[in-house]
Every structure is written in C-alpha cells, then in structure tokens.
Amino acid sequence: MTTPQKPRILRPSDEAIIDTDRRRLIQTGAVGLAGLAGASALGMGLPLSQAWAAGNDVPPVPERLKKWRSEGQTVELMGKKIWYHDQGPKTDDAVFIVHGYPGSSWDFQGVVDRIGPNTRTVVMDMRGFGLSEKPLDGDYETNFTLMRQADLYEMLAKRLGLKSVLLMAHDMGQTVGLELMARFTEGRTPFRVRHAILLDGSTLIDMIEPTPFQKAALAAPSTAAEEDMAWEDIFNIFPESYAKESRARDDFEELVTCQAHQIYYNNGSRIIGGIVHYLKERQENFNRWSRTLFTFDSAPMTLVWGEQDPVAVIAMADRIKRERPVTDLYKYPDMGHWPSVEYPERIGDHVIARLGSV
C-alpha cells in the first residue's frame, strides 16, 4: 500500500495556495499549463501511447465512449446546451450523479451499468465538460462557477421531475453536491436528498495538495486559451492521480483516452485550465460548504475514498469522520482519485446497498 503524502496545511483565508504558486510560475517562466501537465506525468515514468506519442495525432474515440455518448441527450439550460444520460424507469426518485474535474459523466458509465436498468440513474455533463456546451467567450465567473453548476443540476432535476435523489458526488462535484445539500436543508431544491455518497474531493481547501496542472492553471487567466492543448498533454493530466494497481491494468490507456477525449471534444482543452479557478471559489465559500460537510443531518452520508489519492488525500476523509462521527467511511488502499473509473462495480454496490435508505 502506498502511504498517502502528508497534506500541506493551508488556512481557508490564506491566498498562499494561489499567489505563491502564481509568483513562482511567472518568475521562472514556467512552460505553461499544458507543459506542466505533461511534465508531471512523464516525470513519474508514465509512458505515452506508442500509437500517438510522435506529433499531435489524436487516437480514435474508443468504442465504449462512443456507446456512452450515443445513449445521452441534450437540453438547453440557461441558454447553453447540456448533455445528460438518463437510464431506467422515469420515476421521480433517482440516483443523481455529479462528476468531478476535469472529468465528465463518462467517469460513471461503469457505475451506471452496475446499478442496472431497473433504477433511474441521471448523470449530467456540467457546463464546460464532456459533451455539454463549452463557451469560449467570457471567463470563469460568467460561465463555470460552482454555484452556476448547482443551478444547472436543480434545473435539470426539475425538468426531469425528480422529487427524491440519492446524491453521489466526486471531486469538484463534491462541492457542487454540498451546495445542493445546503440548499435542500434551506428548503430551496425541487427534490429531497435521501442519501449522500461523497467520493474523493477536496472541499476542505485548507488541506489541499494541488497538482502541477492546478498550480499552472491558477497562475493563468480564467478566460479561454488561444490554442488547444496538445493531445498528449491532455492525456497526461490523468495518470498520476490513479492508484498504481489501476495504472497496471491492461485497459488503463483506453480508460484515460476516454477521459481525455471528453476534454478534447469541442475546444474543451481551451477552457479546462480556466475552470481550475473553482479552487478560489471553494476558498470564498469555505465556511458554507465545510459546515454542510460537517453538520448535514437531513439524510445519511457515506464517504468512499481512495488511500492512494494524491490530491484529495485520505486525511480529508478522516477529518470529516472526526467532525461528523455518524458518517459511514470506506477507505480502499488500492484506489486512487477516480473511484468510479477504477472500481465501478465497487462504487455501484455502495449505491445499491443504500437504495433502500429513506
């Protein structure tokens, strides 16, 4: 088992996470967002695919991703097209899934398969992610805030007639999920949250261990980049945050290729760096979201966490458990930052076991 790196402790009001790294990157003339993403993975000895390592050739979309894309549909919300996947009987009760950064709905395709066709499961691509619209005009504040993403989930739930949800949220989506949970306790959502399952996420921004990719992105403007990132740099955003057991899988490259294609689609690589500014928004709303995380008492809450996660370190899960002792916590030594991709059956079973909760 890999021992998680001790988190670098930061104060919620402290801008050091942003300003220190920005100054360092600017002063040293760092190679930029794409270069740091690639250098990070290559520094760990993670090989690029032999099929496209030379040049900027983009590999074909894997069949499993094509299938997932073909099963979804789009709806216009707040003036932009939003893609979502809606499986199962059209009841007013559903598993409602919020993906993370820089992932997409596809990260949960295996979980959706595991839950099966007899349970309604809804997973949406947030604005700027996956197959949803990726506006190049404006900036983070006008397009991609966590509050705006929560608004979109509310709107989709209302449109689909959802009245009760088992809410599952991962990574950045954990914070969006917590905002929905906070609104539910305030009587502001069209649905009730009957159970919350939270996967690896760094809502506790005072304990964050930012990646080189995040550091570089925070040092740059939140507007769209002028050029696309190279394919291999998009691909290399992901491998280091997987568990070593996952990186040894025969289909690992295909899994990451699917994730990278979801970014690459429709100019996504030009905006993905700017969306990292959600870390600032986490700081600004730290009290609201950490309070929800520690005191939510309107429904049961379960944590599922990978002990090899280098970003949302396991100490975060332990802290939540200490602050909210009634939380169910499941820690896995063979899991990294992407539980739903690394072990979809395991995550799906957690959902199935809680479908009867009220």
Image (spheres, grey):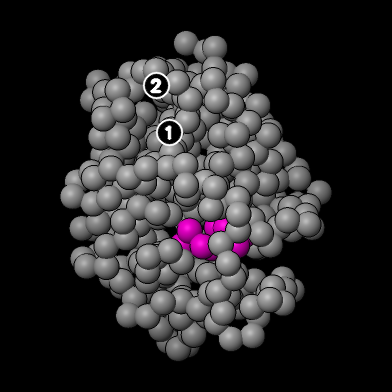
User: Can residue 14 be seen here?
Assistant: no
Identify the element where label 1 is drawn. Answer: strand
Side of 221 relative to 122 (left or right): left
Side of 349 relative to 186 (left or right): right
The residue wearing badge 2 is 90
Residue 142 sits in quarter: bottom left
Residue 194 on image: x %, y %: 44, 18
The residue wearing badge 1 is 86
Residue visible at 39% across and 17% down in the picture: 91
Q: In the displayed structure, would residue 350 be above or below residue 199?
A: above
Side of 358 relative to 135 (left or right): right
Q: How many numbered marks are there?
A: 2
Name the residue furthest left.
Answer: 79
Residue 302 on image: x %, y %: 56, 27
User: Can residue 29 be seen here?
Assistant: yes
Q: In this orientation, which residue lies closer to the viewer: 55 or 280?
A: 55
Q: Is residue 346 magenta?
A: no
Identify the element where label 2 is drawn. Answer: loop
- Residue type, label 1: Asp
Residue visible at 45% across and 88% down in the picture: 29
Residue 146 on image: x %, y %: 32, 47
Q: In the displayed structure, would residue 251 be above or below residue 50?
A: above
Residue visible at 55% across and 52% down in the picture: 65
Q: Are marks 1 and 2 in contact (CB under 8 Å)?
A: yes
- Residue type, label 2: Lys
Residue visible at 41% across and 77% down in the picture: 228
Q: Which residues are magenta?
A: 256-263
Q: Main secondary structure of the magenta part?
A: helix
Residue 296 sits in quarter: top left
